[in-house]
Amino acid sequence: MQAHQLKPSPGSRHARKRVGRGNAAGQGTYSGRGLKGQKARSGRKPRRFFEGGQTRLMRRLPRRRGFKNPFRVEYCAVNLSDLRIFDAGAEVTPEFLKERGLIRNLKRPVKVLANGALDRALTVRVHKFSQTAREKIEAAGGSAMEMGNGDSSN
């Protein structure tokens, strides 16, 4: 088959509707424009989103307000109750947390929060701790060490 032999499928192409050619043609009298009014006249149509002088929708809706801090750091949060899956004496790092399914990826820094209790001594080495989480880890006999943002595979 050659390119000049290609034809569209039957029924996929329609003839252009010829409006305003009399009532016998099916689109006579008002030619599909309805009755009188601005949109029935020839020439320019009202501009997009023009609502006849009423305040247009885009002006009626509230816009984004406030301030978005471009320097905000989003942390992956890990609770102390989540650290109970590790054995006593284990060293907990972001890579180990990802391996155990507690965080999704290593692109964001990890912060340990104080929700829950810790009953075993762990060496936790992540980017950030809440103050209460640090106290609870040290009270359980473990150590909480902060790593800089360049220490992990960020």
Image: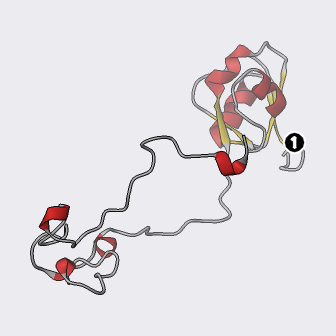
Which residue occupies 37% across, 62% down? 16
**Residue tagged 1:** 152
* Quadrant, the N terminus: top right
Q: Residue furthest right?
A: 151
Percent across and percent down for residue 150 are: 88, 50
Tell me: residue 153, above or below residue 122: below
Q: Is residue 75 above or below residue 100?
A: below
> Seen from this angle, which residue lies furthest top?
87
The residue sitting at 76% across, 27% down in the picture is 97
- Comparing 136 with 56, the one in front is 56
Q: What amino acid is found at the position of numbered circle 1 in the picture?
A: Ser
Residue 47 in the image: above or below residue 28: below
Residue name at image x 76 percent, y 28 percent: 98
Which quadrant holds residue 70?
A: bottom right
At which x and y percent is residue 92?
Answer: 81, 26
Q: Which element type, helix, strand or loop, lies under badge 1?
A: loop
Answer yes or no: is residue 74 visible.
Answer: no
**Residue under the image location 46 percent in, 41 percent down:** 10
Where is residue 79? Give x, y as percent: 63, 30
Q: Residues within 10 Å of mark 1 (few under 14, many from 20)?
A: some
The part of the image, by quadrant, that contains residue 121 is top right
Q: Nearer the viewer, residue 12 or 4?
A: 4
Q: Is the residue 30 above or below the residue 152 in the image? A: below
17 horizontally vs 129: left or right: left
Is residue 39 in view from this perspective? yes
